[in-house]
C-alpha cells in the first residue's frame, strides 16, 4: 500500500513526499482506525483523507460545513482529475440527480456533504446501499461549543456511529485546544481513537506586532510592500472596515469591504472577487475567513487587536497556506481593549470576564519582547526549540529596546514592593508616572518614594513595561484583582541579576521594517518577470474554467515554473505540484508561454 499511496501523491498531485503527520494520519485511514488529526491551517489536512480515498474501495464521505468550502475542494480535486462531487442547496434538482447516479454507478471517490443533509433519512438510507470507504469530518471543531465556530448541526453527527457502526470516522481540525479535542472524540463516539497533533508553528509566517501610531498609514505602508499580492485586513468595527477599504482603494489598490452589515449578495460577490483575484485586498471584520481556502494570501494585517490569541492564530493563519513566506502584522493599542469591552457590554458577567481575560493575554503577548513564534507555540502548549526564529519583529531586531532596562525594571519592582503587592498594573503605572488623581491622594501614594519616578516616560509606556515584566516572569498577577507581585526572578532582578527586555516607545525613531528580510529564499532563482507572465496566464485559464486561480496552480508551483523554466512536457511534469491531469490540461499553453518568453529574452 505504501508504494501505491506514494504513487497517487505523485501522479495526482505532483508531490514527491508526504509531510510527517500526513503519513501517520493516512495510515489510520487505511487501517480503518478512528482518528483525529490536528494540524494548523496550511498543514495539509485535505490530503490526509483525499489520498487514501483514492486507494480504498468505495466512496469516501466528507462532511464539510460550508458550500463555498465544498465547492473549492471539489474544484481543486476535479482539476487534478479526481472523481469528486458535492450535494448541497446550491444545486438544481437535475444536478442532484446526476450526482446520485454517479454514486450508484460507483463513479465517485469522494462526496462532500453538509452535516444536516447527510443526516436526513433519505440520504442515510441511500448511502447505506452503496459501498462507503470511510467518513471524514472536516472542520471538526464545529462540533464543540468550546470552539470558536460552534455549529449546532455538527452536534447531530454523534448518530453517525449508530447508522454506520462499521465505518471508521476521521476528524480534522486546526484548533489546538485540548478541551475541543476531547469534545470532538466524545461527541462522535469514536472508538479506540488515535489522536495526532502536528507542530503548531508556522515557520513561513513572519509576525510583527506594532503599537498603533497612525494606523491607516501603517496599514498602507504594509500593503505597499506587497504590490500585486493578495492580502486581508481585519478591523474591529464595520465603520473601520469601510473607512480602511476606502483609503486603500484611494491609493489605487483594489480593496473591498466584508462585514455582517452588508447584504448577503454583496458579501458573496466581494468574497468571490477576492478569490478570483479581481480584487487584491479584502477589508473585513471577523465575519470573514471561514470558507476561504485561498492558498496564496501573502499578508494578513490586523488593524486592531483581535479578540484572543486563538482568534489571532486562526485569522493570521489564513496567510501562506501554500507554505510560501507571508507576513502577519498586528497593530494594537490600549484603545482596542476599551472598544471590545464596549462591544461585549451586553454579555453575561462570566462571558465578559472570560473575554477580558482573553484580550489581556493577547495584549500581554503583543507588548512582550519574546519571540512571537515561541510565544504562540508555547501558548498552545508546545515547546519551541529555536533560539532565533528569523521571522518575527523581535528576532529580526526590529523592536527598539531601551538602553538600561535593569534600572527601569528596578524602579518598577520597587514601586510594586512599596505598594505591598496589593495593587494592579494600572494603579502602579499611575504612581510611577506621578499621576495625582483623587484615589492616589486618598491612599497617600503620592508620598511614596517611588511616586513619579518614571514621570518623563508617561503612564502608557510604564504600563507597557509592567506588562513586559509580567510576560518575562519578573512580575506576577495574583488574585481576583490581578494585583502585581514580585516573583522569584523579580527578586533577583532587584539585585541586578537578570536580563529583561523593555521596548522603547518612540515610534518616530522606530526603525523602518525591512520587508525583504525574510522574503529572499522563497524567491531564490525565480525569474520574477516570467512569474508575472505566468500569473496572468493562470488568471485567464482560471477565469475560462470558472475556478479560483490557485486551483489551476498554487503560487508555489508557479514559482517553480518560473524558477526551472521547463521547455518540454517531460520537464514540465517533474515540477512540484504538477500531476498527470495538470500536464494534460496545461502543459501546452504554459510551455508555449515559457518558450515565448525565453525567445524574447534572448
Ligand atoms: P489545511 O486544510 O490543513 O489548511 P491544505 O490541505 O489546504 O491545508 O494544504 C495546504 C497546501 O499545502 C495546499 O496547497 C496543498 O496542496 C499543499 N500540500 C499538502 N500536502 C503537501 C505535500 N505533501 N507536499 C507539498 N505540498 C503539500
Ligand atoms: Zn522570533
Image: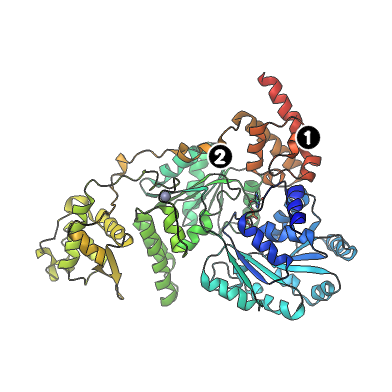
Closer-to-camera residue (506/12): 12
Rendered image: mark on residue 569: 1
Q: Quadrant of residue 339?
A: bottom left
Specify whether 358 is left or right of 450.
right
Residue 445: x %, y % from top left: 13, 66
- 300 sits left or right of 419 in the view: right
* Count of numbered tags: 2
Provide residue 412's location: percent of width, then percent of height.
20, 59
Tell whether 313 sits left or right of 435.
right
Q: Find the distance from the CA under tag 1 to the CA under tag 2.
A: 25 Å
Q: The residue tagged with tag 1: helix, strand or loop?
A: helix
Q: Residues within 10 Å of mark 2 (few under 14, many from 20)?
A: some
| Element type at mark 2 | helix
Q: Nearer the viewer, residue 162 or 219?
A: 162
Choose top left, top right, bottom left or bottom right for residue 452.
bottom left
| The furthest residue to the top | 602
Relative height, residue 30 to residue 242 (above, below): below
Q: Residue at x 70, y 71 (%)?
A: 33
Q: Is mark 2 within 8 Å of ligand 1?
A: no
> How far across and down, in percent of the image, does residue 432 sit?
18, 59
User: Which residue has dot 2 on it?
Assistant: 522
For residue 580, which numbered disc appears in the image? none
The quarter in which the N terminus is drawn is bottom right
Amino acid at each position: 500500500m505504501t508504494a501505491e499511496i506514494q504513487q497517487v501523491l505523485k501522479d495526482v498531485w505532483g508531490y514527491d513526499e508526504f509531510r510527517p503527520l500526513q503519513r501517520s494520519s493516512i495510515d489510520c485511514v487505511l487501517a480503518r482506525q478512528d482518528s483525529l488529526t490536528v494540524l494548523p491551517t496550511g498543514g495539509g489536512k485535505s490530503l490526509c483523507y483525499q489520498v487514501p480515498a483514492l486507494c480504498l474501495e468505495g466512496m469516501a464521505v466528507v462532511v464539510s460545513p460550508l458550500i463555498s468550502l465544498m465547492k473549492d475542494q471539489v474544484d481543486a480535486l476535479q482539476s487534478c482529475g479526481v472523481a469528486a462531487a458535492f450535494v448541497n442547496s446550491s444545486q438544481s434538482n437535475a444536478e442532484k440527480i446526476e450526482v446520485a447516479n454517479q454514486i450508484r454507478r460507483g463513479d465517485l471517490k469522494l462526496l462532500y456533504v453538509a452535516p444536516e443533509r447527510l443526516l436526513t433519512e433519505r440520504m442515510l438510507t441511500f448511502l447505506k446501499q452503496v459501498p462507503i470507504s470511510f467518513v471524514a469530518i472536516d472542520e471538526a471543531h464545529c462540533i464543540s461549543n468550546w470552539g470558536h465556530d460552534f455549529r449546532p448541526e455538527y452536534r447531530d453527527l454523534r448518530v453517525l456511529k449508530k447508522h454506520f457502526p462499521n465505518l471508521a470516522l476521521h476528524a480534522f481540525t486546526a484548533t489546538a485546544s485540548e478541551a475541543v479535542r476531547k469534545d470532538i472524540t466524545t461527541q462522535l463516539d469514536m472508538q479506540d481513537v488515535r489522536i495526532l497533533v502536528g507542530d503548531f508553528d508556522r515557520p513561513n509566517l513572519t509576525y510583527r506586532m506594532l503599537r498603533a501610531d497612525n494606523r491607516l498609514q501603517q496599514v498602507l505602508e504594509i500593503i505597499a510592500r506587497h504590490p500585486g499580492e493578495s492580502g486581508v485586513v481585519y478591523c474591529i468595527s464595520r465603520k473601520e472596515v469601510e473607512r480602511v477599504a476606502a483609503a486603500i482603494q484611494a491609493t489605487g489598490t483594489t480593496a473591498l469591504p466584508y462585514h455582517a452589515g452588508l447584504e448577503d449578495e454583496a458579501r458573496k460577490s466581494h468574497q468571490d472577487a477576492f478569490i478570483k483575484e479581481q480584487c487584491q485586498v479584502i477589508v473585513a471584520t471577523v465575519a470573514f475567513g471561514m470558507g476561504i481556502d485561498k492558498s496564496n494570501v501573502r499578508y494578513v494585517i490586523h488593524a486592531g487587536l483581535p479578540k484572543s490569541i486563538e482568534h489571532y492564530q486562526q485569522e493570521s493563519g489564513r496567510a501562506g497556506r501554500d507554505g510560501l513566506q507571508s507576513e502577519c502584522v498586528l497593530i494594537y493599542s490600549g484603545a482596542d481593549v476599551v472598544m471590545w469591552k464596549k462591544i461585549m457590554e451586553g454579555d453575561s458577567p462570566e462571558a465578559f470576564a472570560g473575554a477580558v481575560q482573553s484580550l489581556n493575554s493577547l495584549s500581554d503577548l503583543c507588548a512582550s519582547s519574546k519571540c512571537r513564534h515561541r510565544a504562540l507555540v508555547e501558548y498552545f502548549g508546545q515547546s519551541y526549540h529555536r533560539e532565533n526564529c528569523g521571522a518575527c519583529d523581535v528576532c529580526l531586531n526590529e523592536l527598539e529596546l531601551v538602553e538600561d532596562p535593569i534600572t527601569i525594571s528596578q524602579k518598577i519592582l520597587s514601586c510594586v514592593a512599596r505598594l505591598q503587592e496589593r495593587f494592579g498594573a494600572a494603579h502602579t503605572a499611575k504612581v510611577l508616572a506621578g499621576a495625582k488623581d483623587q484615589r492616589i491622594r486618598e491612599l497617600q501614594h503620592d508620598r511614596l518614594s517611588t511616586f513619579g519616578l518614571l514621570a518623563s516616560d508617561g503612564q502608557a509606556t510604564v504600563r507597557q513595561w509592567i506588562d513586559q515584566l509580567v510576560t518575562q516572569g519578573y512580575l506576577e498577577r495574583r488574585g481576583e484583582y490581578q494585583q502585581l507581585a514580585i516573583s522569584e526572578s523579580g527578586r533577583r532582578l532587584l539585585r541586578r541579576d537578570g536580563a529583561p527586555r523593555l521596548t522603547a516607545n518612540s515610534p518616530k525613531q522606530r526603525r523602518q521594517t525591512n520587508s525583504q528580510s525574510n522574503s529572499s529564499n522563497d524567491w531564490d532563482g525565480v525569474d520574477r518577470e516570467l512569474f508575472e507572465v505566468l500569473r496572468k496566464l493562470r488568471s485567464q485559464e482560471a477565469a475560462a474554467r470558472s475556478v479560483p486561480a490557485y486551483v489551476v496552480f498554487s503560487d508555489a508551483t508557479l514559482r517553480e515554473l518560473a524558477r526551472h523554466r521547463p521547455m518540454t512536457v517531460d520537464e514540465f511534469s517533474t515540477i512540484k505540484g504538477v500531476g498527470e491531469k495538470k500536464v494534460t490540461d496545461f502543459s501546452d499553453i504554459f510551455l508555449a508561454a515559457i518558450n515565448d518568453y525565453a525567445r524574447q529574452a534572448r
